[in-house]
Amino acid sequence: MTDVVDAKTLPIERPQSALWRGFLPWLGLAPFTIFVLLFLILPTMNIVAGAFQTADGSFTFQNIIDLNTSNILGAFWVSMKISFLTALLGCVIGLLLAAAVTKGGLPSWLRDTTMTFSGVASNFAGVPLAFAFIATFGRLGLVTLIFRDWFNINLAASGFNLISFTGLALTYLYFQIPLMVLIVTPALDGMKREWREAADSLGASGTQYVTMVALPILWPTLLGTFALLFANAFGAVATAMALTGSSLSLMPIVLFAQIRGDVLQNPHLGYAIAFAMIAITGVANLIYIVLRGRAERWQK
């Protein structure tokens, strides 16, 4: 015999209001929005406003004009050179490495290992990275001693100095190359087999396939990643500070000296330097975003 349930005893299911349903997604987004507002948007606005102010708060262009000094222009030129060099080498070496593990027919475990290491190394920067290179390539570093004791090669006597432009560029490549591998690998995976088969059926050689098919498709990705690596190196400060101190004049180090220095500090000139760095890195990141969008058309 079937039990008869009184409808009045059942719990009443109240429909969720449209206002609450619309509020929930915004509530989940709130922590990220607050974080971006407090640590990105407001500090950036404060820097931009400070670049056009004097110490008493009045408006001025003098801070921007003062950027045209030999000290700041020299630091700007060194930062441009090291950013361009490490971005170029990072793109070339990273592309070759990514092509080897994706298209080279190597064991799959090697690809997994490379991608895992790239994910870790691309975020390994700052003081830990500087200490790792000092312990490896410093005057008493592990590799330095191995070259000296096993192969009778004195790196210091040969001209290599870790606390120099070359040493800092070598250190930057530690995170530039893995970042290139992470970005370009999906683009290489998006290269369809049918394109290579079609080129082979038409009698194209390997060089013709690379220059006439692969590179035109990969060009937006490569150029966009170059811009991203350039911005990545241009804004790096902790690694340069920990490795070279004040011996190598870079834009982030000059900026740090103006804001936190004890003798020559000029916070508003520091704001102007930071404003110039934001403009340069912003243009580089904008180029990356635009070219990334063009490159993703081939991956759909």
Image: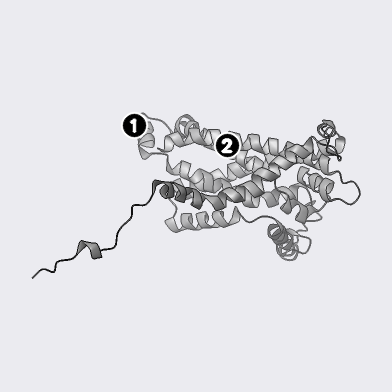
Pointer 2: what residue? 288
Q: How is the image coloured?
A: one colour
Query: From the viewer's perspective, is residue 281 above or below residue 262?
Result: above
Q: Residue furthest left?
A: 1
Residue 49, image x, y percentages:
75, 37
* Residue at image location 80% in from the left, 40% down from the top: 75
* Residue at image location 79% in from the left, 53% down from the top: 244
Residue 32, image x, y percentages:
56, 50
Label 1 close to label 2 by CB (< 8 Å): no
Q: CA distance from mark 1 to mark 2?
A: 35 Å
Pointer 1: what residue? 201
Residue 100, image x, y percentages:
49, 48
Kind of element beneath mark 1 = helix
Query: From the viewer's perspective, is residue 2 above or below residue 46?
Result: below
Compare residues 285 and 271 and report the one nearer the observer: 271
Residue 89, image x, y percentages:
63, 43
| Front of the two marks 1 and 2 | 2
Q: Is residue 284 visible in this depiction of the protein?
A: yes
Q: Is residue 23 left or right of residue 258?
A: left
Q: Quadrant of the N terminus?
A: bottom left
